[in-house]
Amino acid sequence: QKEVEQNSGPLSVPEGAIASLNCTYSDRGSQSFFWYRQYSGKSPELIMFIYSNGDKEDGRFTAQLNKASQYVSLLIRDSQPSDSATYLCAVRAGNMLTFGGGTRLMVKP
Amino acid sequence: DVKVTQSSRYLVKRTGEKVFLECVQDMDHENMFWYRQDPGLGLRLIYFSYDVKMKEKGDIPEGYSVSREKKERFSLILESASTNQTSMYLCASSEGNTIYFGEGSWLTVV
């Protein structure tokens, strides 16, 4: 079974700090990698996706992918209390999208 | 705006009942999915469909079936609901690298 692993947290960071969220996956055939944010009681919303090794930046968010190590991460710069949510890593192989268990992030004012 | 609509947001059903969860998307997407989400377990794929009348099992299909008679509609069926199927169910549709989720259906089986 294809696996996507995340530390469940909670990860607590002070406001203005960098939050670093990590994800590992087992399927070497995975093609695309996604980060979703999910507020309590809401459905997940896409933050960004990456499919090439290296970094991809979008505003305060940077996704990093290392296919050799089967590792993808999300950095959130200048963290805000509104960033407090659960962050889901998802990995796509073919038409299948497999999610990790999510990491709960708490940004303290 | 893309819309994925789950018609039932909150349901309470009795053990053994047949339950239908309906999902409709308005973007003519080929792919549609049903996930369930439980605390600490993330989203687990139940079934997905890549075309009308086509379906594939996901990671946890046991106790569920699906129906896709029209492209825009993907239904999840619990033939005989059990208490361990109490969960939040998310429908999604996708095209390319973008997946769109519905608002979720919270099912309680008593």
Image: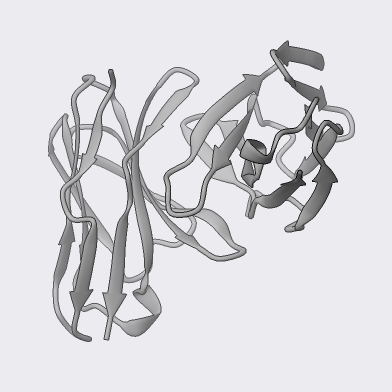
Residue at 79%, 40% (x, y): give it.
Answer: A21
| Residue B93: image location, x then y, percent | 33, 32
Q: Is residue A56 left or right of residue B103?
A: right
Q: Is residue B19 above or below residue A15?
A: below
Q: Is residue A54 visible?
A: yes
Q: Is residue A4 visible?
A: no
Residue at 68%, 18% (x, y): give it.
Answer: A51
Residue at 80%, 26% (x, y): give it.
Answer: A78
Q: How is the image coloured?
A: one colour
Q: Is residue A8 left or right of residue B39?
A: right
The count of marks equals 0
Q: Is residue A14 left or right of residue B83?
A: right
Q: Is residue A22 above or below residue B71?
A: below
Q: Is residue A108 left or right of residue B106?
A: right
Q: Is residue B18 above or below residue B56?
A: below
Quadrant where the N terminus of chain B lies? top left
**Quarter where residue B5 is shown:** top left
**Quarter where residue A79 is shown:** top right
| Residue A80: image location, x then y, percent | 71, 34
| Residue A56: image location, x then y, percent | 75, 13
- Of residues B103 and B24, which is closer to you in this image? B103
Residue at 36%, 49% (x, y): give it.
Answer: B90
Quadrant where the C terminus of chain B lies? bottom left
Identity of the residue furthest to the front in this view: A109
- Of residues B76 and A30, which is closer to you in this image? B76
**Quarter where residue B42 is shown:** bottom right
| Residue A82: image location, x then y, percent | 62, 37
